[in-house]
Amino acid sequence: MVAKAPRHYWMDLLNVIACFAVVMLHCTTTVFANSGDTEWHLDVLFQSICIFAVPVFFMISGANLLGYREKYDTKTFFVKRFRKVVFTLVIASIIVYVCQPLLAFIIAGTPLDISIGGFVKGFLHNQICDIYWFFYAIIILYAVTPVFSLVAQNKQVLGYAICLCIATTMVFPLLERFSPDGGFLSLFMVPYLSSWLTYFLLGYYLVHYCDKKPAAWKSALVAVVCVAIMVVMTVKTNAPHTLAAGSFAPYDNFYASAPGLFALVYAVALFFLFGHFNDAIGSAKAYPFINKMSGLSLGVYAMHMMVIHTLDLVVPHSIVWNIGLRPFVVFGLALALSFIGKQFMAFTRKLRAK
């Protein structure tokens, strides 16, 4: 009899926190104005703290999906995964394409521009909601999962693939940042590898092959150090050319970006840290609620930008609103929309079954 795989309760909690972190990232995008004022410095801090979100999403997906062959065949895998993600992408795109300009028309009198042709063009070019790049990226990762699921069966081969990914997408760009000439290491970058594949493979490796995990305090310390490095280096890099400095240049987020090496180490540290508290999280009275919230995370991701744009039409910007209140309001409203959508789909499935 095959032993039942342990339940990773901590992934549900980390998924919920990562979902809120995504909302926080998109509520602090004034950082890209590179103003150099107090709010900008706070934006840099929160952007650095929350940059783990998308890496963690990909890591959790990889941890749960690269071993799919132990549960079902490849056809079933494709049906289950593509049905969920593609359906969410299509429905969310329709809702956002129609509702966002409609709300802007009702609230601010903005001219309506809605058409079938406009929707098709926007959908094919990711112009309906630019953060939907995540859906397109995860679809591609699902497409290559059958190949890398075979790689994942061998610890050494998987480790080698991860090292190649990290070197070509994170280490080489960081080294070239300090290279006087630049361009040399780019000659050795492996084509077609990306940071998202790195996280996807790494998530499975950490969960299934890392038997010895660092102590919780060490993981927490590494996470804090990574955030500190990202904040300090980002401020140091941008401070000379902010609006406050009088010599403006576009915001440079190299050190605090999701595809960066510091974000990777930060995300790995959080993976280890949360894993230490798996039993405590699973036995907590709040876990059933956490589990339900985790199941709504994809919907929250899909809806939160529409909520942000709508609130921007009615609530004046201020440092208290932008950073202190807006993330929580947006997360709550997006969570409610996701819940309503999920209940509606469950209701329609029951009707079809009758």
Image (spheres, rainbow, N blue to C red):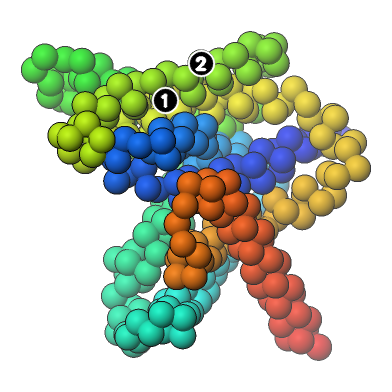
Check residue 349 in the rendering and tell me which mark sits there, or answer none: none
Check residue 225 in the rendering and tell me which mark sits there, or answer none: 2
Type of amino acid at the residue the image marks with label 2: Val
Q: What's the residue at 63%, 18% (across, down)?
A: 220
User: Total of numbered circles in the picture?
Assistant: 2
Q: Nearer the viewer, mark 1 or mark 2?
A: 1
Q: Position of residue 104 (x, y in %)?
A: 42, 78
- Which of the marked residues, 1 or 2, is nearer the chain's N terminus? 2
Give whichever of 54, 247 is nearer the camera. 247
| Residue 270 visible at all | yes
Give whichever of 275, 6 is nearer the camera. 275
Which element is circle 2 on? helix
Q: Image check: 246 left or right of 298?
A: left
Which element is circle 1 on? helix
Q: Position of residue 206 (x, y in %)?
A: 60, 25
Q: Position of residue 98 (x, y in %)?
A: 45, 81
Type of amino acid at the residue the image marks with label 1: Val
Please determine whether, in this image, residue 314 is positioned above or below residue 261. below
| Residue 251 visible at all | no
- Callout 2 environment at 10 Å: few (<14), some (14 to 19), or many (20+)? some
Q: Position of residue 161 (x, y in %)?
A: 42, 26
Check residue 231 in the rendering and tell me which mark sits there, or answer none: 1
Q: What's the residue at 42%, 25% (across, down)?
A: 231
Q: What's the residue at 27%, 27% (across, down)?
A: 239
Give whichever of 65, 312 is nearer the camera. 312
